[in-house]
Structure formats: structure tokens, C-alpha cells
Image (cartoon, rainbow, N blue to C red):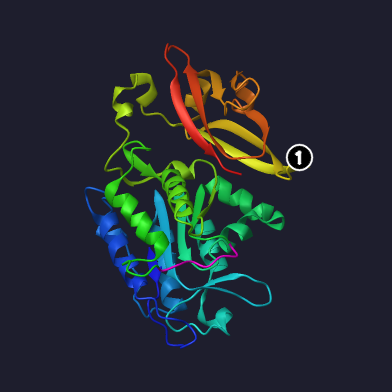
Amino acid sequence: MLVGAATYDDPRLTNVPAVANNLADLREVLLDPRLGGFDPAFCWTAPPTAGIAKVGDLLGQAAAEAEELLLFYYSGHGLLEPRRRELYLSLSATRPDRPQFTALPFEAVRNVFLDSRAAVRAVILDSCFSGRAIGATLAEDADTILGQLQAAGTYTLASAPGSRTALVLPGERHTAFTERLLRLMHTGTTQAGAMLSLGDIYRHLQAQLQAEGLPAPQQCGTETADLLGLVRNRHPDRRHAAAPAALTEPTTLHLAHTARSDGSQTPSGRNYFRINVYLTSFEAAELDRVTKVVYHLHPTFPDPDRAVTDRSSNFALVVRAWGEFNLTADVYLAGRRAPIRLERFLNI
């Protein structure tokens, strides 16, 4: 479901014509059989003048019908409620002094997602203060909700940190974040495989936006939601085609991880995190076939190659780290000589 407001009734909210282009062009990519291949019957765009009730009805219907993927994209002005600093998504009739009654509260979107049975639920926000959506999810007093989101497989990609504003650059057809998102979808990247996963998209946009001095996107992924392939990759890494069959064989096995601060810091003041990496699958029988997992950590770790054989912990590996890095793992199965190679970006 795509939602956005390009024009506003209240003169205190600046019109953003690029938002209409965001919605139209993203829908085109998602429906393109060469890229997204989505069914038009299940890809909805809210009317430009839709109010809270209309958006709520559409989102509720989408959440009720979705089985594999529930995707919510929003572009427009994000507002912070003055007292509690909660994120609201502006609609055409929004009044900035009354967001509680005239704008869409992100909390309402989260609640609809919690009630959906979709296997993967993804939110993409291109708005000012969109990082607030992640901050609320990860707050210490929201552990109960976070646990439910992890079980459901939820992924949030926000165009800007909670304290930064999203941008529209002169001469560009779209907002800065969506411009680069669509550019990636159209041109592809050699840094990913045949599909662009949500995690691939985040890593590419983070590098691209930071290189241009633009607000860096934020992500919050649970379980294996970031592995979802959203669109086909136009220019995949051709080395995958020459890889051994064992590395490209379809599998229900995935890597997942959790990360929490352990309260200590490096000498330079960076927080240490306790990272728990483990193997998961929708089929328990597939996990039972695993005999060993060899994790390949960043080369700066002492003993970066570590083997785990404990099935009772889902072959979990616990490490202490202060930075994000890409981890690979070789998964050995009973009756199979070559391992299956899995990969996960360990964000903290």
C-alpha cells in the first residue's frame, strides 16, 4: 500500500509535488513484470485527498488480505506531537497544530501490522523525522511489542534519523531518498544477487546518501525480514552464477540475530553490544539436518572463524562488538559434502 500527500490544505505545510511522482513511479516499478511483478489487484495507492478514515480502511483491508508480504510506503511531511514527541504522518487535510486529530499516527500503522498474518511486514517511510518509527520500536519500555514484531518478521526502513529532516533536491523528480531508491531499482547493483532484498536496499542507500552528504537512512529488521527480495536486480553479481551448487541451492535456513548494549564502552567512547547470531528455519526438520555451522566474523576479531555444533541453541554464536559488519556462515548438513553459504549484515 502506497500513501502520500503532495499538497496540503493548511498553508503551514509546504506542498511537495515530488511526492506524487514518488507514488506513481514506485507503483510502476512494483508492477513492472521485469522488476517487482506485483499483481495490480493487490498494489493500492491511497487517493491524494484521503483522510485518516480512508487510509485506515485501506490499510486494514490490506493487512487482512496479505499472506506473504504486507508493504506500507509513505511519503510526505512527518510531524512530531509536541508533548510526547510521537510520529504522525501528514495527509492532505492535516493541521500541524492538531496532528492527533488530522494526521495518521504511526502507532496506528504499527497496531495494524501486529494484527496481520502476513509472513513478512515491511514499512518504508520517506518523511521528516521518520527515524522516530524505529526509535519507538526499539525503546526499552516496548520490549513486549518488539518481541511480537520479531516473531512476525517486521522490517522498517526510514529515510532519515529521528532528529533529521528528509530532503527534496533542486532539479530532481522525486524526494532525495526515493529518487535513489528508484534509481537502484531501475539500474540494479553488482553488490547483490538476483533479487534486491530489503537489507541490500538499505546498505546501498546508506552508502549512497552518506557519500552525497545527505541524511543517512535507518533500519530496524527482525528475524529474517531483511532477506525478503523486493524487486529483481538488473545487474546482479555474476560471481553467484559460477559459485558451487552448494552455495546457491534453495534452502529454508536463514541467519537471524539480536543485539543489545552491554553497558560498556570502548576507550574512544563507542558502546559495546552483545550480538547473538543463530540459525532459523520455517521447517524444524531442516534444522535437524544441520551438523555444524562455521561463522566467519570480521577479520579484526580474534579467531574470526568459529564453529558451533549445539543444535539446542539453534547453533547460536554470541560475540561482543562495537560496530556493524557483514557476517557469513557455512552450514553443514548431514549427507551433504559441501556446506550452504548464508550471509547476514549485523546491524546494531
Q: Is residue 164 magenta?
A: yes
Classify residue 55 by image quadrant: bottom left
Toward the left, the furthest residue is 33
Main secondary structure found in the magenta portion? loop
Name which residue lies at 45% across and 77% down.
91
Percent position of residue 155, x then y? 50, 51
State which region is magenta. Answer: 162-168
Question: Is residue 205 shown left or right of residue 300?
Answer: left
Percent position of residue 137, x then y? 61, 57
Percent position of residue 3, x then y? 39, 69
Neighbor class of circle 1 (other Cα within 10 Å; few <14, some 14-19, many 20+) is few
| Location of mark 1 (residue) | 267
Q: Which sits in the foreground, 171 or 36? A: 171
Query: How many numbered marks appear?
Result: 1
Position of the C terminus by quadrant: top right
Image position of 141 with respect to 95: above or below: above
SS for callout 1: loop
Task: Give the residue type at disc 1.
Answer: Pro
Name which residue lies at 65% across and 36% down.
275
Position of the N terminus by quadrant: bottom left
Percent position of residue 251, x then y? 40, 29
Name which residue lies at 48% across and 73% down.
77
